[in-house]
Image (cartoon, rainbow, N blue to C red):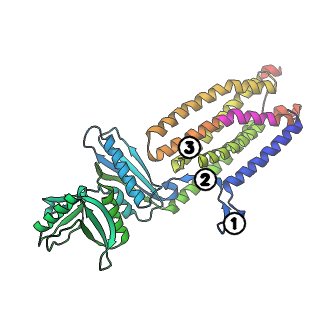
Amino acid sequence: MKKGKSITMLSILGVLIVLVAVLCFVPFEIPGVSNGQPRTWRGIANTIDQGIDLKGGYYVVLEATAKDEDSTADVNNAVTILRDRLDKKGYTEATITTQDTATANPKIRVEIPEVDNANEILQIIGSTGELKFTNEGGVRTYLTGDDVVSAKVSMNNDGKYVVALNFTADGATKFANATEELTGQTMYIYLGDEIISAPSVSSKIVGSSAVIESFDTYDQADAIASVIDSGRLPLEFSVSEAQLISASLGQDALKNSLIAGAIGLAIIFIIMIAFYGGLGFIACIALVIYTLLLIMLLAFIPGVQLTLPGIAGILLSIGMAIDANVIIFERIREEYASGKTFAASVQAGFHRAVFTVIDANVTTLIAAAVLWIITPGSIKGFAITLFIGVLLSMLTAIFVTRWLIRLFRPLVPKEKEEKFFGLKRGAEVNE
């Protein structure tokens, strides 16, 4: 390659790197307006979907007691019911995953970003939704959720929020019989193990509807209505984990992680240049290209969510990228020390190193793929970013680094080639 062509291509590459870096990290206003508002470019990095440990939110892990050996169908039905409950409350960004489905106590993990009222979420998720109308002590059950057609929030004559129930035809008959039997007594209405209302019955009530009272706010009544309306969960669940993560805590964690990553990259750049000279500088450029490409892939690939473990996966993949370059450079040094020309050393070094790099990376890719498939929650975030990062690092180390060496070589005079690229002849060759 001629020197002029190398300069032109490196100049274009430099401009592209700066342009992509600006598009990734720098927010700015776009000239013109859209719907009466100025258009703002947020930066590609800011469009990456973030997990609740960074964005803030609430997560709950429900542990089930299986009714039989194979509870897969029941767990899947429970996931569907929980999704319906959350969608009705507007939590459409919630993620629901299953854990330990092959065991006697399968689990369901629910993650909801940007939650303010944890108690309301726990009511929606943690309740089994088993509605019962009983007498005192729960000795006799008169009606269940199966007798209810719908449950909606309404307001009574006193301006209080209530949950209005509509019964099936059979449910209306059961309710009339129950109120007749409990006249002068108290009817207890349970949702799961919690008494949500205990009205006094003054006379027999005939009709296809009833109301549950004693709610102070609309959200309380709506949470109960959503649980009743979605139906009873097919398994008994208990809350094994629950945690509210503030958005400020998540953003602090993200900021500190990015600072640590930037410091780590700076140290890596210094060490690579100190040890490998021009080759190390080329590796730094390749690493910058790799980082920008990784950010764009994380932003554009559907379903990728950035979490703290995911950031750990990215940092590990960066380490793998550096490791691949070190292996390649050491092979080039060995070939050059044996007496070959620089061009022949580069060709032989890449040829010898590529199989080692592929072998090491494929092993990691298989491990990441297995984790991606079989693990839930935050481990999955680690596996996804690790898989994408390692695959990209392998490609950049093998192809981008070699291409950059070809671009830089015409710019270095023959007599300075050895010093610039940090190479040295072996003792036997010098003799």
Disc sitting over residue 385 in the figure: 3
Using the rendered image of the protein, determine whether residue 336 is visible from the camera's viewpoint.
no
2 or 1: tag closer to the N-terminus: 1
Q: Residue at x 51, y 45 (%)?
A: 381
Which mark is on residue 258? 2
Instruction: Give the image quarter of residue 195.
Output: bottom left
Residue bounds of the magenta highlight: 395-407
Residue 33, disc: 1
Q: Position of residue 175 (x, y in %)?
A: 18, 64
153 vs 50, nearest the viewer = 153
From the image, state whether disc 2 or disc 1 is nearer to you. Answer: 1
Residue 334: image location, x then y, percent: 73, 25
- N-terminal of the two: label 2 or label 3? 2
Q: Position of residue 133 (x, y in %)?
A: 19, 62
Quick check: 364 left or right of 348? left
Q: Quadrant of residue 362?
A: top right
From the top left corner, tell me how far across and down residue 306 is, in percent.
Answer: 54, 50
Q: Is residue 404 magenta?
A: yes
Amino acid at dot 1: Val
Q: CA distance from mark 2 to mark 1?
A: 33 Å
